[in-house]
Amino acid sequence: MAREQGRKLVAQNKKARHDYHIEDTWEAGLVLQGTEVKSLRAGRASLVDGFAEVDDHEVWLLGVHIPEYTQGTWTNHAARRKRKLLLNRSEIAKIERKIADKGYTLVPLQLYFKDGRAKVEIALARGKKSYDKRHTIAERQANREKEQALGRRLKGMD
């Protein structure tokens, strides 16, 4: 059988970009059990409550829900277990230094397969205040209205 090529998105955390200012991102491998991989290949996962933490110079992914594999037996995995992330030592040191600053957290943005291997994109993020969220929404709405007005003008409707 030929090796899988390209990138297949399994889960995305859209709310993270709404709730946090994204500072920096990293791609990390995941240490998974067999039934977790099968469940991910079926496209079943949720990153909504997920976060990552550094513990003893290792990065762990917590709160990510990968449901049990339906055809699994007694060897099935726990849905919200702690999963180890695979990063270089220099990347982990950089993350540790930045996390030491108050207000920063690690959140997963995407879970995907890249050339047949499960990967997660984690981001160093700082929480947004409610007025920041309102400002972002207002800015997006203003840009949308500007693009619509420009489109109408180019079509000769105004």
Image (tube, grey):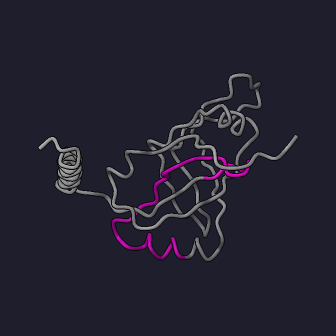
Drawn side of residue 126 relative to residue 75, left or right = left
Q: Where 38 falls versus 52 (above or below)?
A: above
Does the magenta portion include 95? yes
Q: Residue at x 38, y 65 (%)?
A: 104
Q: Position of residue 128 (x, y in %)?
A: 27, 57
Task: Write the residue at 58% across / 56% down.
Answer: 60
Q: Is residue 16 above or below residue 10?
A: below
Q: Within the magenta stretch, is there residue 138?
A: no
33 relative to 65 in the view: left or right: right
- The segment highlighted magenta reads 94-119
Outermost residue to the front: 156
Residue 94 visible in image:
yes
Q: Quadrant of residue 10?
A: top right
- Is the N terminus in the top left, top right, bottom left or bottom right quadrant? top right
Tell me if 137 is positioned left or right of 101 in this view.
Answer: left
Q: Compared with residue 58, is residue 44 higher up or lower down, i.e. above or below?
A: above
Q: Report the quarter where the C terminus lies.
A: top left
Q: Say which residue appears at 45% left-offset and 45% top-offset.
A: 13
Percent coordinates x, y for residue 46 in the rendering: 51, 38
Residue 133 at least partly seen: no
Nearer to us in this view, 97 or 44:
44
Residue 140 lies, in percent from the top left, at 24, 51
The count of marks equals 0
Foreground residue among 20 and 61 = 20
